[in-house]
Image (cartoon, rainbow, N blue to C red):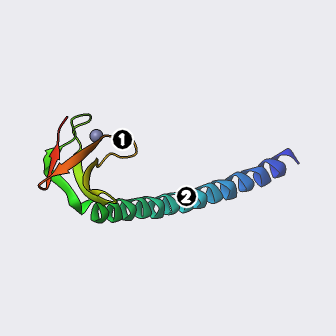
Amino acid sequence: MTAIFERILGKIEVSNAGTTEFLKHQISEISNEISKIKDSHIKIDGIKDKNVSKIYRCMECGGGLIRRKGKTGFWWGCENYPKCKQTYKDTNGKPVYK
Ligand SMILES: [Zn+2]
C-alpha cells in the first residue's frame, strides 16, 4: 500500500517538475520579451536625444547638453534631466557657463 502511494507521489513529483520547467521556460521567454521592450525603449530614447551635444558638457554632472527652444529663445538643458536640472543660457548657439 505504501509502495503504491510512494509511486503515486513519485509521479506527482515528476509532473510537478515538468510544470516547473515549463514555467521556468515561460518566465525566461517573458523576461526576454521584457528586455527586448526595454532595449527598444532605450533606442527610442537614443533617437530622441540625437540633439545631445558632444562638445558642450554639463558642469554639474558631465552629461551632454541639449539645445532647446523656449518662449524667450534658445537655452541649453542637461541630457540627464530630470535628474540634473542644470540649464544654461544660449549665446550665438553656445551654452553660457556661469
Ligand atoms: Zn547635468
Per the image, the residue denoted by label 2 is: 27
Left or right: 47 in relation to 7 = left
Looking at the rendered image, the quarter that the C terminus falls into is top left
**Horizontal and vertical percent for residue 21?**
57, 57
- Residue nearest the viewer, comparing 92 with 37: 92
- Residue nearest the viewer, comparing 86 with 18: 86
Q: Quadrant of residue 68?
A: bottom left
- Residue lying at 22% horizontally and 40% vertically, measured from the top left: 58
Left or right: 71 in relation to 89 = right
Q: What amino acid is found at the position of numbered circle 1 in the picture?
A: Lys
Mark 1 neighbour density, 10 Å: few (under 14) some (14–19) many (20 or more) = few
- Whether the residue carrying mark 1 lies under 8 Å from ligand 1 is answered with yes
Q: Which mark is residue 11?
A: none
**Horizontal and vertical percent for residue 28?**
49, 58
Q: What amino acid is found at the position of numbered circle 2 in the picture?
A: Ile
Q: Which mark is residue 85?
A: 1
Mark 2 neighbour density, 10 Å: few (under 14) some (14–19) many (20 or more) = few
85 w.r.t. 7: above or below: above
Give the Cα distance between marks 2 and 1. 39 Å
Q: Earlier in the sequence, mark 2 or mark 1?
A: 2
